[in-house]
Image: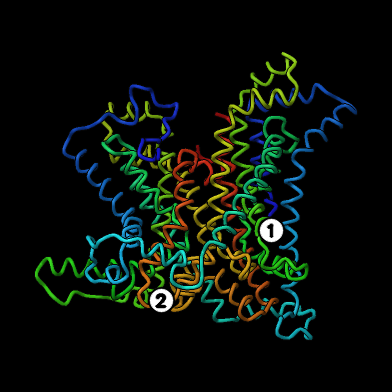
């Protein structure tokens, strides 16, 4: 994974020579470095503990004080994926994948043309439109829950994964429009003018001028939309049942304790979080830009 | 509702005026005139329409429906008694002790999580804004909590950390006590002794990385030459922070605080998983979910939802104003 390399963006206000701050070898610098490491380890500790416990046997996972050096086993994962009991998480994982991937594709199909109309060839009052999109994101989702449930009930879409696809598309569309707009705005006007002067048509301009600049942006946007859809619980819980339940809904089966099941819970948490961890570290350069809706670069 | 009223609009027009690139684009469009221009306008609007119409249908119509239902007597258990209720649902919302407690819980939960993770996020961002060995690795470790599926994270905190018998917290206490040769280490039951604190701590763990990322981006956009000049002029580290770094960071603190509030106000996963809304931790989204999902009282659930929306508009107005300020600076750069 690329996560180990230092990916903090170097802004233009810094000279190459004077990058962040000169390395200090003073004792106070050493203390600060040590402190940074301690804080980092503290924050990652629950994640590491989750991963370690998922590799322990159930009795070893439930000791006090904790047994760190217990022999590793994959029994927790075997239990989670349905070796012993009758239930298996595979259908819910497949549902999550369908809902996240399909809604992300829909979001891209809708947001890229919209962002184009808000940046490259802006419509009049384009900022108003942009802020309309943002304001929909601030509407608490719980306020729309009931009518969507009643609508789904009346047209027979309850417990149907496509209803979630539609909802996740609307949930992520504002983020994607804002992100894509900020990426498209980075295409230099001069290049567009030069292309049109050389007689390049719309397709040609998009292909050879716009696409190369915005491709990384499209990748980051889709990864962030994927993460948000994959994580969603409230709507999935209300709108789906046994057929269309997603992975987070499946995880709610572990809310009440069931005897010795800690290794299985940790294995479940690792397995369900893995796609998000991969997507998140892949997008970590653009994570801030996406999460702040393009307001921070 | 969600049409932002005046703040963004005022900012919007000035943002459009500020930018030179927009001026050149406006000039482009001004060159075309008359009927050609009108058809050109529609050609410009066309790519926007699918997304716009989709958003209006999927987000605005349900809210209108919620508003209508909030004035109705509608309980799925009593289908015959459906009808107009006037303000009865709202009266019940404001007199219901559970909902009033939920409002207070929501405010405490949101304020605690946002303020503490902002403060931690700022301290960590300051630690990371210097070169040291393994800076990238530390940054990666700090982002990890944000990349755990919220339900999964809440499950791990509930079972693997807070559990009084085999959780890591009590395990660590046993360790430390044994290390000093003492038996009988304290073994508190974290969730029952401080239920709201348990939810808040788990949320702070997930939101601090978010704040840290925004504030680090803010720190790195500081004009370093000015700070260097101040240092040469003999300003102390604290003076530089107090009079230069902090004022610069203020806008990023606002942005992080407001975006964080918008997400944390809506939190459902942690409350549902860690305490199932018990022990005084039920916040508004959880309570509305219960009124609707368990009690099937659609009228009352909708009235509560309308109240939440009105509360959110207050935060959202500030948030939109902050974003539009940043937006204006960004495009005039």
Query: Residue B224: x, y in percent?
Result: 37, 29
Q: Where in the figure is residue A50, as x and y percent of width and height?
A: 35, 60
Q: Are there few (<14), some (14-19), or many (20+) residues within 10 Å of tag 2?
A: few
Q: Is residue A62 left or right of residue A249?
A: left
List the residue tagged with mark 1: A162
Is B51 situated above or below A251? above
Residue in view at x 39 percent, y 74 percent: B195
Looking at this view, name the residue that lies furthest to the left: B181
Across and down, in percent, residue B64 comes to: 75, 63
Q: Which mark is residue A257?
A: 2
Relative to B123, is B136 above or below? above
Q: Give the residue at the far front of this rendering.
A: A83
| Chain of the residue under label 1 | A
The quadrant of the image that shows the C terminus of chain B is top right
Q: Which quadrant of the figure has residue B76?
A: bottom right
Per the model, the C-alpha gap separating discs 1 and 2 is 32 Å
Dot 1 or dot 2, earlier in sequence: 1
Q: Secondary structure at mark 1?
A: helix
Observer-nearest of A273 and A83: A83
Q: Quadrant of residue A13?
A: top left
Q: Residue at x 37, y 44 (%)?
A: B140
**Which residue appears at 44% of the width and 57% of the height?**
A271
User: In this rendering, do the residues under marks 1 and 2 share a single chain?
Assistant: yes
């Amino acid at each position: 994974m690329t996560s180990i390399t230092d990916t903090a963006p170097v802004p233009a206000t810094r000279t190459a020579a004077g990058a962040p701050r000169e390395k200090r070898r003073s004792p106070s610098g050493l203390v600060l470095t040590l402190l940074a490491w301690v804080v980092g380890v503290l924050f990652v500790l629950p994640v590491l503990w989750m991963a370690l416990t998922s590799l322990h046997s159930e009795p070893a996972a439930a000791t006090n004080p904790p047994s760190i050096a217990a022999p590793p086993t994959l029994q927790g994962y075997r239990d989670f994926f349905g070796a012993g009991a009758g239930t298996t998480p595979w259908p819910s994982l497949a549902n999550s994948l369908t809902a996240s991937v399909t809604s992300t594709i829909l979001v891209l199909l809708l947001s890229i043309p919209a962002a184009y109309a808000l940046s490259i060839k802006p419509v009049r009052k384009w900022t108003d439109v942009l802020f309309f999109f943002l304001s929909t994101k601030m509407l608490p989702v719980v306020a729309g829950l009931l009518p969507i449930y009643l609508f789904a009930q009346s047209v027979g879409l309850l417990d149907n994964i496509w209803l979630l696809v539609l909802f996740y598309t609307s949930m992520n569309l504002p983020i994607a429009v804002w992100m894509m707009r900020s990426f498209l705005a980075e295409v230099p006007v001069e290049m567009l003018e030069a292309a049109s002067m050389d007689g390049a048509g719309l397709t040609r301009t998009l292909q050879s001028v716009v696409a190369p600049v915005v491709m990384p942006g499209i990748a980051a946007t889709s990864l962030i939309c994927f993460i948000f859809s994959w994580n969603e619980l409230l709507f999935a819980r209300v709108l789906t049942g046994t057929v269309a339940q997603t992975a987070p809904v499946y995880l709610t089966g572990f809310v009440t304790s069931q005897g010795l099941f800690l290794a299985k819970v940790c294995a479940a948490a690792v397995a369900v979080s893995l796609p998000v961890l991969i997507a998140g570290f892949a997008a970590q350069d653009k994570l801030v830009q996406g999460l702040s809706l393009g307001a921070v670069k | 509702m969600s049409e932002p009223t005046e703040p963004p609009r005022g900012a919007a027009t000035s943002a459009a005026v500020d930018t030179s690139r927009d001026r050149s684009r406006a000039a482009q469009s001004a060159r075309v005139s008359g009927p050609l221009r009108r058809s050109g306008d529609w050609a410009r609007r066309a790519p926007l329409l699918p997304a716009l119409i989709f958003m209006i249908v999927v987000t605005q119509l349900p809210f209108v429906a919620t508003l209508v239902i909030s004035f109705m007597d509608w309980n799925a258990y009593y289908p015959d008694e459906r009808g107009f209720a006037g303000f009865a649902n709202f009266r019940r919302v404001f007199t219901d002790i559970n909902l009033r407690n939920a409002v207070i819980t929501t405010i405490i939960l949101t304020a605690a999580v946002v303020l503490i993770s902002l403060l931690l996020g700022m301290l960590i961002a300051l630690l990371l804004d210097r070169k040291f060995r393994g800076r990238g690795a530390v940054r990666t470790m700090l982002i990890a909590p944000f990349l755990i599926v919220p339900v999964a994270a809440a499950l791990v905190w509930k079972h693997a950390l807070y559990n009084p018998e085999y959780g890591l917290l009590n395990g660590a206490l046993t360790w430390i006590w044994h290390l000093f040769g003492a038996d009988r280490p304290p073994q508190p039951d974290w969730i029952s002794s401080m239920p709201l604190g348990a939810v808040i701590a788990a949320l702070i763990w997930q939101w601090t990385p978010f704040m840290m990322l925004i504030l680090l981006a803010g720190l790195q956009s500081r004009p370093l030459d000015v700070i260097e000049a101040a240092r040469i002029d003999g300003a102390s580290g604290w003076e530089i922070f107090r009079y230069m770094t902090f004022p610069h960071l203020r806008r990023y603190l606002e942005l992080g605080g407001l975006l964080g509030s918008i997400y944390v106000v809506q939190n459902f996963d942690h409350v549902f998983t860690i305490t199932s809304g018990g022990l005084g931790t039920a916040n508004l989204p959880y309570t509305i979910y219960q009124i609707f999902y368990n009690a099937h009282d659609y009228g009352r659930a909708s009235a509560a939802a309308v109240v939440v929306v009105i509360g959110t508009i207050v935060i959202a107005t500030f948030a939109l104003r902050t974003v539009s300020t940043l937006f204006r600076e960004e495009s005039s750069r």
